[in-house]
Amino acid sequence: DVKVTQSSRYLVKRTGEKVFLECVQDMDHENMFWYRQDPGLGLRLIYFSYDVKMKEKGDIPEGYSVSREKKERFSLILESASTNQTSMYLCASSFPAWTGRTEAFFGQGTRLTVV
Amino acid sequence: AQSVAQPEDQVNVAEGNPLTVKCTYSVSGNPYLFWYVQYPNRGLQFLLKYITGDNLVKGSYGFEAEFNKSQTSFHLKKPSALVSDSALYFCALLTGAGSYQLTFGKGTKLSVIP
């Protein structure tokens, strides 16, 4: 089975802290993604990466950065956490769409609360 | 611009009855369409996908979806609902083989009433 593992299920951080969310996948997927999920807004893409050291902004990159030093690991960084970043964060990975194996696999999510 | 719409925030259905969760899409090219399910405080699980071929796609847990190009729809269906099907369902769109970004609908909460 494909496994996408996020380092924490629940996190509570203080305003202004630097926060690291880690994601590891074991399926040798080229693509990795970070989404945030908020009620009534669905899933919104923050950043994605299609290769090691490559990153692209999604729909809502402000206040976030990412790092992909190894193929299996994709980190999301909140440079200075703010209360409006309280949310559920979901990591996903997939093969490139041209392979036909297009479905993304998701981690269990990290519920981040910034106080 | 590509988009996905799930017109119903919530769908209620009695156990044993057929269920439908609606999805419509807008895209300039050929769509790749997906359904995912999310149980409380969990990540999303893949249910099924349409890329090409038969318009009726079968997936996990007895779910199926019908791709209708003329109506730009991809509705999720199940002949007989179970209480355990109660969850949040998301439709998603990928705009073809060269694209990376999945576009999600806002989700539909399905409640199956015993």
Image: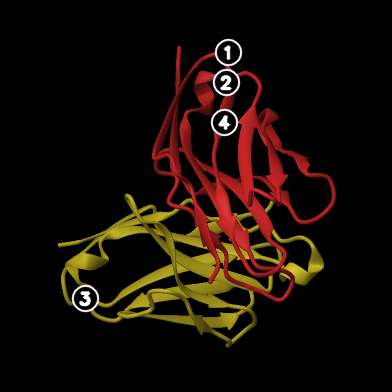
- Chain B drawing hue: red
Q: Rounded to the nearest whole Å, what is the CA distance between mark 4 and mark 1?
A: 13 Å
Q: Which residue is mark 1?
A: B16
Asked whether the residues under marks 4 and 3 belong to the same chain, the reply is: no
Q: Are marks 4 and 3 in contact (CB under 8 Å)?
A: no
Q: Are marks 2 and 1 in contact (CB under 8 Å)?
A: yes
Give the mark toward the camera: 3 or 2.
2
Asked whether the residues under marks 1 and 3 belong to the same chain, the reply is: no
Q: Amino acid at mark 3?
A: Glu
Q: Which residue is mark 3?
A: A17
Q: Which residue is mark 4?
A: B20
Tell me which label, 2 or 4, sits earlier in the chain: 4
Residue at 39% x, 40% y: name it: B9
Q: Rounded to the nearest whole Å, what is the CA distance between mark 1 and mark 3?
A: 50 Å
Q: Amino acid at mark 1?
A: Gly
Q: Position of residue A99 (x, y in %)?
A: 80, 67
Q: Which residue is mark 2?
A: B81
- Chain A drawing hue: yellow
A51, A69: nearer the viewer: A51
B108, A36: nearer the viewer: B108
